[in-house]
Amino acid sequence: MSSCFPRKDENNLKNSAMLLKQLIATCNGKCNPIRSFSEKELSKATINYDNERLITTNKLFYRLYNGFLQDRQICVMKFEPICLPQEEEVIQRGINNIVFATQMKHKNFLKLIGCCLETRFPILVFDSVGCIRLTDRIWGHSRPRLGPLLLKLRLKIAMEMAHALAYLHFGFPRPIVFGSLTPWNILLDEQNVVKLFDFSISEFIPEGKTHLEVPLTKKLWYEYVPPDILHAIAPNEKFACNEKFDIIDPVIVGEGICSVKEQQLLALARLVSECLRPEPEDMPNMIDVAKQLRQMYKSS
């Protein structure tokens, strides 16, 4: 009796053909070389996908697993059809991620070292250096040894995010849209260097809203009404007396709010408000955002 599930060789042929087609169309065959891994290798490296030191599920359909392969720490991105029934869309998303990741030459992106195409859904393998999720730094309480996320470090993280996005927007003949930027899929390495990895175009979250979450607050962007946070941080009021000051992360407040820091936070609030403008043409580009964040970081 024949199986209704595709065999590994069938998956490999189909996925390889899709990948080759996308590579030719997108980068004309000019990309970083990557290795081909077997499903057995990756299952062993991740202890049968049971190593949950780093695991995240977004609203779409992938998980991250830490593992070790040939004494090298890796991060495995495994797609799963969790929310969308269209399997072909899941497969295409995996292929797109491979294509875009092979083109990345930037310190703020995880380095793709290989993939597995013999499974129904492509699996990506990244070089990992002890990365943790940004959410674990903002909201997590299980890693006290990491210390508080102070304003200077937050500005550094926001600056590096902007540099990475500027690279995607302006570093390629055909700009890459990073469509799912949230603290859940932003990683930090052991030196708190930002590492991005998901290049799929999915539910689009305006980039300014993520920049709001990182340096200013523990709340999520969709908790804010109105979206213009200058309504919440009024330039004519002292922060400590502002009834709406509760949007600022208590960690930042605990550092103390001097006049210099108050001006920094106001400048950051203005920048975020500009990034939240309804019309794209009215928003600053990511190069300008990165420059302004760099100035704030250097003066902090």
Image (cartoon, rainbow, N blue to C red):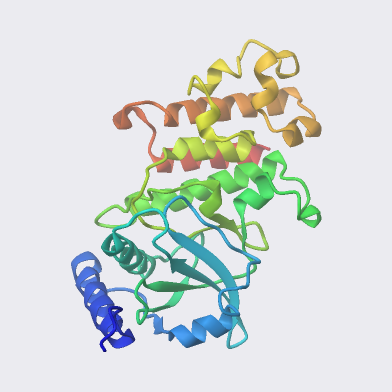
**In the displayed structure, would residue 239 be above or below residue 15?**
above
Q: Is residue 295 visible?
A: no
**In the displayed structure, would residue 48 be above or below residue 284?**
below
Q: Position of residue 66 (x, y in %)?
A: 59, 71
Tell how many labels: 0
Residue occupying image coordinates x 54% and y 29%: 223
Residue occupying image coordinates x 74% and y 13%: 241
In-front residue for pair 285/226: 226
Extreme-top residue of the structure = 236
Q: Is residue 176 left or right of residue 135?
A: left
Q: Is residue 198 visible?
A: yes
In-front residue for pair 75/111: 75
Residue occupying image coordinates x 25% and y 55%: 174
Q: Which quarter of the image is occupied by the N terminus?
A: bottom left
Say which quarter of the image contains residue 52: bottom right
Extreme-front residue of the structure = 1
Q: Position of residue 193 (x, y in %)?
A: 60, 57
Q: Is residue 252 left or right of residue 268?
A: right
Say which quarter of the image contains residue 216: top right
**In the displayed structure, would residue 202 be above or below residue 126?**
above
**In the displayed structure, would residue 266 be above or below residue 26?**
above
Q: Position of residue 21 (x, y in %)?
A: 19, 72
Q: Which quarter of the image is occupied by the C terminus?
A: top right
Q: Position of residue 24 (x, y in %)?
A: 20, 72
